[in-house]
Image: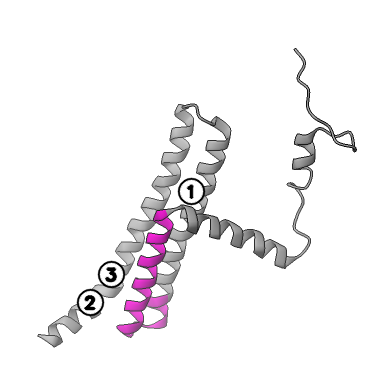
Amino acid sequence: MSQEISTSQSNKPEAARKREFSWRVATNLLISFRYAWSGISYTFTTQRNFRIHLLIGALAISLGVSLHLQAIELAVIGITSGLVLALEVMNTAIESVVDLTVKQSYHELAKVAKDCAAGAVLVAALASVLVAGILLLPPLLVLVRAAL
């Protein structure tokens, strides 16, 4: 059984023409940043949890600034929040690749891949909450006690 693939003037199959440039490295740093920003923008617009993590991270850093935390403490909160966001972007990428691969069918390994990626985000988010709690709660309690 032969499948016919449409060809262009260059006599390449259409699928090959579409993938022709997908393997190439960006020609300059600006294009690389544009591709990266495109992935972040896609994640921001399509993933509710990314927006939630971004808001909570911004609130934690803002609270740290208003509580006059040391720079190193703010950096730790920023790094842990950034890790959660980075893992959320990776989770989105993994889910997209899995969806592309299995299409509309169910596969147990696809479920495992998606669940593990989501689990990585959860572990990072819990660690981030722990770090923020350790760094933010003591000065926050001091502030509350002083107000009473």
**x, y percent for residue 26:** 75, 58
- Residue occupied by mark 3: 134
**Which residue is outermost to the right?**
10
**x, y percent for residue 147:** 14, 86
Task: Count up the numbered dots.
Answer: 3
Determine the secondary structure under disc 2. helix
- Residue occupied by mark 2: 138
Q: Which residues are magenta?
A: 48-74
Q: Identify which amino acid the numbered label 2 is placed on.
A: Pro
Badge 2: how crowded within 10 Å, few (<14), some, or many (20+)?
Answer: few
Dominant SS in magenta: helix
Where, by quadrant of the figure, is residue 116 drawn?
top left
Please report contact status of discs 2 and 1: CB closer than 8 Å, yes or no. no
Please report contact status of discs 3 and 2: CB closer than 8 Å, yes or no. yes
Residue at horizontal 28 percent and vertical 70 percent from the top: 134
Q: Identify which amino acid the numbered label 1 is placed on.
A: Asn
Q: Identify which amino acid the numbered label 3 is placed on.
A: Ile
Please report contact status of discs 1 and 3: CB closer than 8 Å, yes or no. no
Image: 143 above or below 104? below
- Residue occupied by mark 1: 91
